[in-house]
Amino acid sequence: MITDFSERLIVQEVSPRDGLQIEPTWVETADKIDLINQLSLAGFSRIEAGSFVSPKAIPALRDGDEVFRGIQRQPGVIYVALIPNLKGAERAMAAGADELNLVMSASQTHNLANMRMRCEQSLSAFGDIVSFTAGSEVTLNGSIATTFGCPFEGKIDEDRVLQFVDAYLELGMQGVSLADTTGMANPRQVHRLVQRVLTRLPASALTLHFHNTRGLGLSNVLAAYEAGARRFDASLGGLGGCPFAPGASGNICTEDLVNLCDEMGIETGIDLPHLLTLSRRLPALLGHEMPGQVAKAGRNCDLHPAPVGLS
Ligand code: COA
Ligand code: ZN
């Protein structure tokens, strides 16, 4: 297959959710709102702005209600909320989320660790959420965490992942995300699974969610893109990680992804200088360096003056 690199790549920014959920430093509600407002001006069409989970499970995002109510919505931006159960759906709808991202793991062990439920219980809760949201304007996306590998169980059977994709589609969800929770995916595996999933749903309904835990994040993006995927999650600065997955670390870094796309001529519609400005503020907000690289190195086109005295 010859890949058409002129096809637009859609980036869903997840730093306000995946990015902040693992941070030990409390980020004030006003600072979360300011971050989302700034991200809303950078050209994203989709921002995962928070989660509505147990505040005991993820204290860092316990203010999701105030955050969603406080943001300045930009037209054309879909504000997504991650939820695990019906209570999360009720809270997210009341706070005005445009889309609910329903999450469970392909791995039974990780789902028990993360959601304190078996996969079957998660699916049953998702059925309740579908009924609850029927007739509303909210859209539903189903995420499958640990799709490409689990830190407890290791490899995940691809057919099991496909069964969950089918279950989500049967429930009537509009989108599906395949998540590599702890960066265990490799490009060949990604290419194969994306091709298989795209026989079931269009590229406009599939999102890939990669973590750069083992340095393969952007390689996996290219493999997925070549297999036909067009939507990707990424996090400003390369923040992110699941607190219930040992060894978890950051999502693929948004500005590194956008820089890659700019260099390759893949359109994203995202303003890279704006992103770099935002990313360079994160160390002061969170008290540590970011894993992302382009914010430190600058864009390819950010040249340096030649040393003086060259002849
Ligand atoms: N929002 C707020 N509170 C919630 C909630 C939600 N979506 N779901 C449950 N709760 C509350 C209950 O009201 C109850 O409160 P109480 O102790 O004051 O009575 C408490 O949490 C326990 O409820 P229960 O239904 O027994 O949940 P649990 O302890 O079995 O935990 C989850 C299940 C799914 C709520 C929890 O594991 C969770 O939130 N996990 C998400 C983890 C996550 O976000 N991981 C990273 C993203 S993938
Ligand atoms: Zn993640």
Image (cartoon, rainbow, N blue to C red):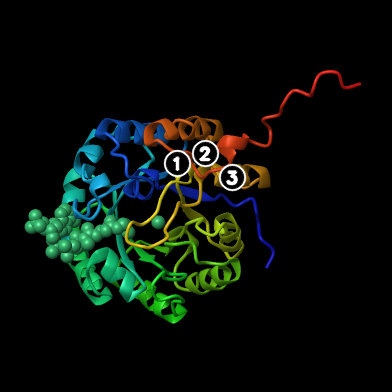
Image-quadrant location for residue 285 = top left
Alpha carbons under labels 3 and 2: distance apart:
8 Å
Question: What residue is rendered at 21% in x and 54% in y?
Answer: 136
Q: Quadrant of the N terminus?
A: bottom right
Q: Are marks 1 and 2 in contact (CB under 8 Å)?
A: yes
Q: Indicate which disc residue 203 carries.
A: none
SS of the residue under disc 3: loop
Q: Residue 232: horizontal and vertical position, in percent? A: 48, 54
Note whether residue 140 is visible: no
Q: Is residue 227 left or right of residue 278?
A: right
Q: Indicate which disc residue 270 carries.
A: 2
Ligand 2 sits in which quadrant?
A: bottom left
Q: Residue 296: horizontal and vertical position, in percent? A: 58, 36
SS of the residue under disc 1: loop
Image-quadrant location for residue 3 = bottom right
**Is residue 240 positioned above or below 152 on the image?**
above
Q: Mark 1 is on which residue type?
A: Phe
Judge the density around disc 1: few (<14), some (14-19), many (≥20) Cα neighbours within 10 Å: many
Q: Mark 2 is on which residue type?
A: Ile
SS of the residue under disc 2: loop
